């Protein structure tokens, strides 16, 4: 079945460091890929998405490229801020009904 | 615009008791989802509604969990009787697209359930 695997956390970085959170997926067909973020005390919110191979999703300085050949959708940011501290979830949709399948989440902590 | 509303925010019960969670999606959103998020794991879909009809309930433990969405708006998720392993955050989400494909999901803040 479809599944998503993320790198384990927590990830601790200093402010202005470069961020990569790895995400790989297993799916039949051509899923859409998403990154959701959960800030402390808040609900999940969509960060970015890509719907086909080689698409790049971007938002708030974060980027992720849909790589079909490596079945990956790694999240990157060139310079993190303390306010980026949150849990990040990679997810896929099999485009049949819209339900999301999530990875286990990666906690990011950015220190000043 | 108002977001997805859920209540209660926290609930503590003893095992074998029953509990109910309520969700009010964003106005006009046809699709409603209930997810279960166990500590340290990603959310897992329990049930998906399209208006007031069930689209997917394949991962809903139907011997103890039930859900309804009367009139295609609000929804209630019930657990009866609860088990220790039901301790989790229960998330409600909604989306506008009636086909539910590739649409942005809006999540509520969730109900944190502790079963003692």
Image (tube, helix red, strand yellow):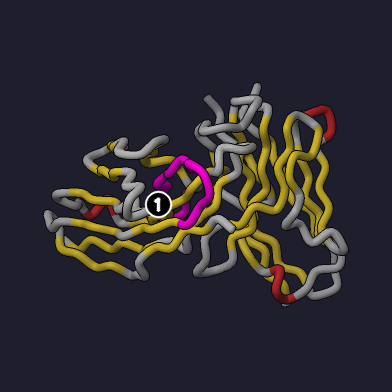
Picture residue at 50% right of the left edge, 69% below the top: B40
The vertical placement of A49 against A17, above or below, is above
| Residue occupying the far left of the picture | A16
Q: Where is residue B74 in the image (x, y as percent from the top left)?
A: 75, 35
Reading the image, the residue beneath label 1 is A39
Q: In which quarter of the image is residue B60?
A: bottom right
Picture residue at 22% right of the left edge, 40% below the top: A61
Depth check: A50 or B52 in front? A50
Q: Quadrant of residue B96?
A: top right
Depth check: B41 or B88 in front? B41
Category of crowding for the residue at label 1, using alpha-carbon neighbours closer than 10 angstroms: few (below 14), some (14–19), many (at least 20): some
Q: Where is residue A13 in the image (x, y as percent from the top left)?
A: 19, 64
| Residue B111 in view, yes or no | no
Q: Position of residue B64 (x, y in %)?
A: 85, 63
| Residue A72 lies in the magenta-colored region | no
A101 left or right, relative to B68:
left
| Residue occupying the far top of the picture | B28
Q: Which chain letter goes with mark 1? A: A
B41 left or right, relative to B50:
left
Picture residue at 61% right of the left edge, 29% below the top: B26
Q: In which quarter of the image is the N terminus of chain A?
A: bottom right
| Residue A10 in view, yes or no | yes
| Residue A32 lies in the magenta-colored region | yes
A5 left or right, relative to B30:
left
Q: Quadrant of the C terminus of chain A?
A: bottom left
The vertical placement of B45 against A96, above or below, is below
Depth check: B11 or B53 in front? B53
The residue stretch that appears in magenta: A26-42
């Amino acid at each position: 079945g479809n599944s998503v695997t993320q790198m384990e956390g927590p990830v601790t970085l200093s402010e202005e460091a470069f961020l990569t959170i790895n995400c790989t997926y297993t799916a039949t067909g051509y899923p859409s890929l998403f990154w959701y973020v959960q800030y402390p005390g808040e609900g999940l919110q969509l960060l970015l998405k890509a719907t086909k191979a080689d698409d790049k999703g971007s938002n708030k300085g974060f980027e992720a490229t849909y790589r079909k050949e490596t079945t990956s959708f790694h999240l990157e940011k060139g310079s993190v801020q303390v306010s980026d501290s949150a849990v990040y979830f990679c997810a896929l949709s099999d485009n049949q009904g819209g339900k999301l399948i999530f990875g286990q989440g990666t906690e990011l902590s950015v220190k000043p | 615009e108002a977001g997805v509303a859920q209540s209660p925010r926290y609930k503590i019960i003893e095992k074998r008791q029953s509990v109910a969670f309520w969700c009010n999606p964003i106005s006009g959103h046809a699709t409603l989802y209930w997810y279960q998020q166990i500590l340290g794991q990603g959310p897992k879909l329990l049930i998906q509604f399209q208006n007031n009809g069930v689209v997917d309930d394949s991962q809903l433990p139907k011997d103890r969990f039930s859900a309804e969405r009367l009139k295609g708006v609000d929804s209630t998720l019930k657990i009866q009787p609860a088990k220790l392993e039901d301790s989790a955050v229960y998330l409600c989400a909604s989306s506008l697209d009636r086909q539910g494909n590739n649409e942005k999901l809006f999540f509520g803040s969730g109900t944190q359930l502790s079963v003692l």
